Image (tube, rainbow, N blue to C red):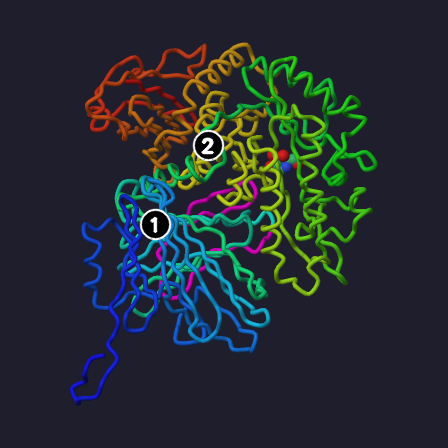
Amino acid sequence: MGTSPVGQPQMQQAADVLIPLGTKNIDLVFKVSGRDGRLYQAFLGAKLSNVEDISKLRDAGHIAYATYGTDNLFEPAIRMTHNDGNPSLELKYVSHQVEKVDGDVTITHIKLKDPVYPVEVTLHFKTFTDENVIEQWVEIMHQESKPVTIFNYASSMLHFDANKYWLTQFHGDWAEEMRMQESELTSGIKIIDTKLGSRAHMYQTPVFILSLNGKSGENNGDVIAGTLGWSGNFQFLFEIDEKNSLRVITGINPFASEYSLQSGKSFVTPSMIFTFSNQGKGLASRNLHHWALKYGVMDASKPRYTLLNNWETTGFNFDEKKLADLIDDTKKIGLDLFLLDDGWFANKYPRNNDRAGLGDWQENAVKLPDGIGSLVKEAEIKGVKFGIWIEPEMVNPKSELYEKYPDWILKLPNRPENYYRNQLVLDLSNPQVQEFVYNVVDGLLTKYPGIAFFKWDCNRMMTNAYSVYLNDKQSHLYIEYVKSLYSVLEKLRQKYPHVPMMLCSGGGGRVDYGALHYFTEFWASDNTDPLERIYIQWGYSYFFPSISVCNHVTSWGKQSLKFRTDVAMMGKMGYDIQVKGFTENELKFSQDAIANYKRLSDIIWRGDLYRLISPYEENRAVLMYVNEAKSKAVLFVYTLNARYGETFNRVILQGLDPAKTYKIQEINVLPDARRPNMESGRSYTGDYLMKVGLNIGSATPLTSTVVEISE
Ligand code: DGJ
């Protein structure tokens, strides 16, 4: 107690409390205000030499997790209506707890509570020290006598005070994934979101880069790069207020998804994963890659199979003989696994095109009279592995599954069914459907334990969706769908912890770290034209390490086989092409390229990525991967186009050790090529390569050069 100037006793204001969360190079600091007991974000940016300095800030900062209903005038992170109809929430700090998981990972839990209603909101921050990544999620629970309704439930809310804000977003469609767009944010709200449910990321990918003050480059500028680990509807909301402060709210899209939360139950949001870099987008990507390789992508430290897929060459039209030939080709060209795609199942309504059979997961007796087992055996005899395609969440109306379980399907009562690729989505919120989906994989693996790989597809979004199972809780559908998908995957991973699985969604319509917790890789796009592909892979490279991005050599595009191979090589390479159609030179070239790839894949998958020349800025795309010891690197140079008389500057390398001397060796050289690049065979110091650079690449459109750089 203190004494006021007029002699009246007065409550003394409590002291502010700082809650700093840091990684090696980032600080995120919260402050509990002694004045009002609320939690504020006081700082987010490059590491401070003395975090305590933040207590000198005159104002507390911005409300860390803004509520609706009391005095917040802008977009809330959380909004709820209590069971008595009161539509307001107020959150005050209660306590926080710091949990040191290991030398790298710390989790800070900050508990907030409404002073009037028994509602508790806990903000969780997992900080990854070495990777400079922060993962945030939120848990909401209450002890009211009846359910409350939550309308907004952000995973994170971050605040910025910069002069200007530049947003880089990634959008697309089927075969046009990850188109990069950068624009300045202006006052008011900008939303990036999806409402597609399943195949949720078909038009917008749940990733963004925010540059503070000015546009950032690969190596300069303050940058936040973030992504939401959620395979369903997401929303990123950017709001600039009257003082030019920016709040970024991320999480599940609250659209049409008010959630009735039972007393004592908790609602846990998905994780927002983000990093801060004061050295531009390049470092931000490397931070996310380091994190993903250790924590984000399933089994990223384990080997991967190179594979031959049959989709582009046979479509639905195959038999045992054709597949046996492809298994032979897999071996001949030097790949590890043959992947059988769509079309192998269903009998009453055979899967001979995309109009029938989906849902009936028994081998088609005409195409495969001896069953999957004989193919697994055939592969084993030939010394390769066998993998298989499934799309277990979907159903064709022309299927036995549809006839047997009409209630298992998402479709509106009183309205016509709405098809996309002639199919409907199963109601995963229904536990019986979850069991069915689980059994598609478990059934195959139990019967054919030799299956070594799955491609899990998902070819449609939700429209006209209604769940019989959810009954009066239709607004839970988008959320329950994803949670149910994760619970099926969780159960599968309990039993089959390491079977590699490719995440696919009619191309890249479902790509995020929520799913990559269960999947080893993803199919980036059905568009494998290598020119298009350079842009698509470039886009993914900002957020996902190359080990997770499946790139196949196919017959799309008219470019040379070398160009197609070199493009596929900067990720997880595979083939989907008629090997029989190769000339002798092409076969030899491919065998050598695959051997090169196997030798260098550890650097490509797990090395540090440097994007050197962007296809968005030049008629070239150049990037390189460098291993941790800086003893090995792989450089990819692609010429996309060249105007008459256009010449290209030397390529200045990055990420090498200036003191080391490196040998330059061109690889993937065609047997009939006139001669390798003039730099090939020479040695230079890292210093020279990073200051003077290499005279590499050609001015001929759609050509490529791959260079191995060794200490
Ligand atoms: C869409 C996928 O993206 C393709 O690779 C292929 O698996 C087809 N589905 C099969 O229907």
Magenta residues (range): 169-197
| Residue in front for this viewpoint, 334 or 606 | 606
| Residue in front for this viewpoint, 281 or 556 | 281
Which residue of the protein is positioned furthest toward the front in this rendering?
1
Classify 400 as above or below 267. above
Which residue of the protein is positioned furthest toward the left in this rendering?
5
At mark 1, the secondary structure is: strand
Q: Position of residue 224 (x, y in %)?
A: 34, 50
Residue located 65% across and 32% down the image: 389
Q: Is residue 142 left or right of residue 401?
A: left
| Residue in front for this viewpoint, 232 or 615 | 232
Gap between marks 2 and 1 measured at Cα: 24 Å
Asked if marks 2 and 1 touch (Cβ < 8 Å), the reply is: no
Label 2 belongs to which residue?
A: 300
Q: Is residue 10 left or right of residue 75?
A: left
In magenta stretch: residue 178: yes
Q: Is residue 187 left or right of residue 339?
A: left
Q: Which mark is residue 224?
A: 1
The amino acid at mark 2 is: Ala
